[in-house]
Amino acid sequence: MSFIERQLQTAVKNITCWANKNGFIISNQKTSCVHFCKIRGIHPHPKIFLKDTPIPVVSEAKFLGILFDEKLTFKPHILNLKQKCVKTLNLLKILSNTSWGADFQSLLKICMVYGSASKSALQILDPVHHLGLRFASGAFRTSPVCTSFAEFHVYNLDGRRFLLNIILE
């Protein structure tokens, strides 16, 4: 671990020198370190310093809108995403009013849900997708979701991710 600490400390010093030379300021309060490691058990975290101040080691950090956890499971990101989606579904509930709401195709476009992580973590989003599909179609809350998929020609999230992977390859 000491070799890795020395390499990281050298990299931090080089970044700090470059930032100072180019007019950037690196904030100690906004800087954190995540030790990505899949090794089980207790092992030491690296001790890295920024301007003689230790950089705190945290279990998860947000970078470009994505929450990275130390095991790279993306579960905290998925849980955060689910919470945001549930809040957003309140808007869909209002938009899906049967007397004055938007049409089915418009509501489906609103219901696009993000996904890329482990299968178990992604399954957390399925109930949100099902609820959104029920709102968009006007189906009862207790109606089976598999019939909604077939009736409205919509794939489940796992199927949609599979198709997107095929398209992107």
Image (tube, rainbow, N blue to C red):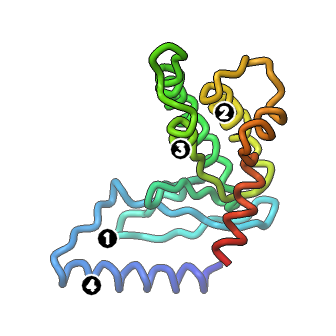
Q: Nearer the viewer, mark 4 or mark 3?
A: 3
Quickly name the residue at label 1.
51
**Residue drawn 65% across and 78% down?**
1
- The kind of secondary structure element at disc 1 is loop
In this view, 154 is above or below 90: below
What is the distance, in whole Å, between disc 4 and disc 3 at their CAs?
45 Å
Which percent across, then down, holds residue 161? 71, 58
- Which sits in the foreground, 1 or 18? 18
- Quadrant location, the C terminus: bottom right
- The kind of secondary structure element at disc 2 is helix
For the residue carrying disc 1, how many other residues have a C-alpha within 10 Å: few (<14), some (14-19), or many (20+)?
few
Q: Nearer the viewer, mark 2 or mark 1?
A: 2
Q: Are marks 1 and 3 in contact (CB under 8 Å)?
A: no
- Which sits in the foreground, 113 or 135? 135
What is the distance, in whole Å, between disc 1 and disc 3 at their CAs?
49 Å
Q: Earlier in the sequence, mark 4 or mark 3?
A: 4
For the residue carrying disc 3, how many other residues have a C-alpha within 10 Å: few (<14), some (14-19), or many (20+)?
few
Quickly name the residue at label 3.
109
**Residue drawn 22% across and 68% down?**
25
